[in-house]
Image: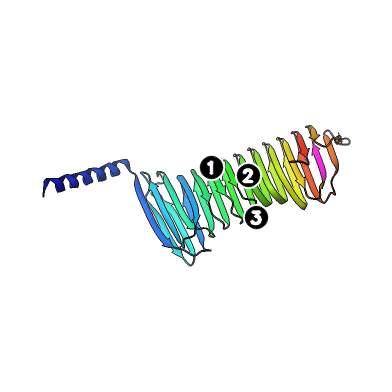
Amino acid sequence: MGFSRLAAAMTALFASAAACASGDRTFERQVPAQAHGVVDISNVSGKVVVSGSDRPEVSVRAELGEGVERVDVSTDHGRTTIKVVLPHSGHGGDADLHVKIPKDSELTVSAVSADVTTAGVTGVQRLNTVSGDIAAELGGSDLELKSVSGNVKLKGHGQPARLHVSTVSGDVHLEHGAGDLEAGTVSGTLVLSLDSARSVRARSTSGDVHFEGKLARGADFDATSVSGELNVRASAEAGYAYEVSTFSGDISNCFNATPGEHGHMPGHTLQGTRGDGAGHMHLKTMSGDVQLCDRK
């Protein structure tokens, strides 16, 4: 063997040894997929980044840390499944998944100790994570999102959809949403902005709710908090009838209405109509202030 070939062989050997020592590996695979198929992704630790494309395939690229056994990719009758597999001992490393899917796919992601990011996906999205953040782009289809111990950032483009978002101990930030929204948090803040809303239900146990947006004609808005503030700035095409109550907080508004007493019970109430009163606004707190304005 010549010196140059020997040197090249030794270089490759040392590079392979270094890669094994670090425990990092790269995985890549592409499989054909239907334009309106289903894609399921699960990961235990690391991150999941999903982007939509016009290609009729699912492309997976992953950086696998030490302790990750493998990545399984399978497809059957329009459903593509991507799963990070750890050793039976349960002690594994991180896996960073970068997945490209047909943009109209129905996407489901389940993650533990992993952040989830989606962009360019126009099909239905179901995103679930424990101890990880979620950042998703809304594509005009329904979204169902559940997070435990993680923050959520959602950005839409004003396309109507049904959005269902819940967190246990994380904040939710929604921009340019539209359609029907149901959002809840146990110990986090809800910051919600909707370009046009048909219905809104917001629930917080020990966090504040901030809403800004426009309500469609006849829209229904319902927000409650046990120990947090409600700050609502909502305009409406044909106005709304409003009912506001708080057990041990103050009520303020931008249209000079005067709150009244809560009968023989402690607290304050505020009732009235803005515009034609076509919609309905209901706000209630136990131990938090309420601010209502009919202008964004």
Q: Percent x, y for residue 217?
A: 78, 53
N-term mark: 1 or 2? 1
| Circle 2 residues within 10 Å: few <14, some 14–19, many ≥20 | many
Front residue of 155 and 98: 155
Q: Quadrant of the C terminus?
A: top right
Q: Write the start and end of the magenta stretch as one range.
A: 241-246
The three-letter amino acid code for the residue at tag 1 is: Asp
Inspect this view and state whether residue 290 appears: yes
Residue of label 1: 133
Q: Is residue 123 above or below residue 192?
A: below
Q: Quadrant of residue 18?
A: top left
Any magenta on residue 245? yes
Q: How many marks?
A: 3
Circle 1 or circle 2, nearest the eye: 2
Q: Which mark is residue 174?
A: 2
Q: Percent x, y for residue 59?
A: 43, 56
Residue of label 3: 161
Q: Percent x, y for residue 219?
A: 76, 51
Q: Is residue 225 left or right of residue 32?
A: right
The three-letter amino acid code for the residue at tag 3 is: Ala
Any magenta on residue 11? no
- SS for tag 3? strand
| Circle 1 residues within 10 Å: few <14, some 14–19, many ≥20 | many
Separation (CA) of disc 1 from disc 2: 14 Å
- SS for tag 1? loop
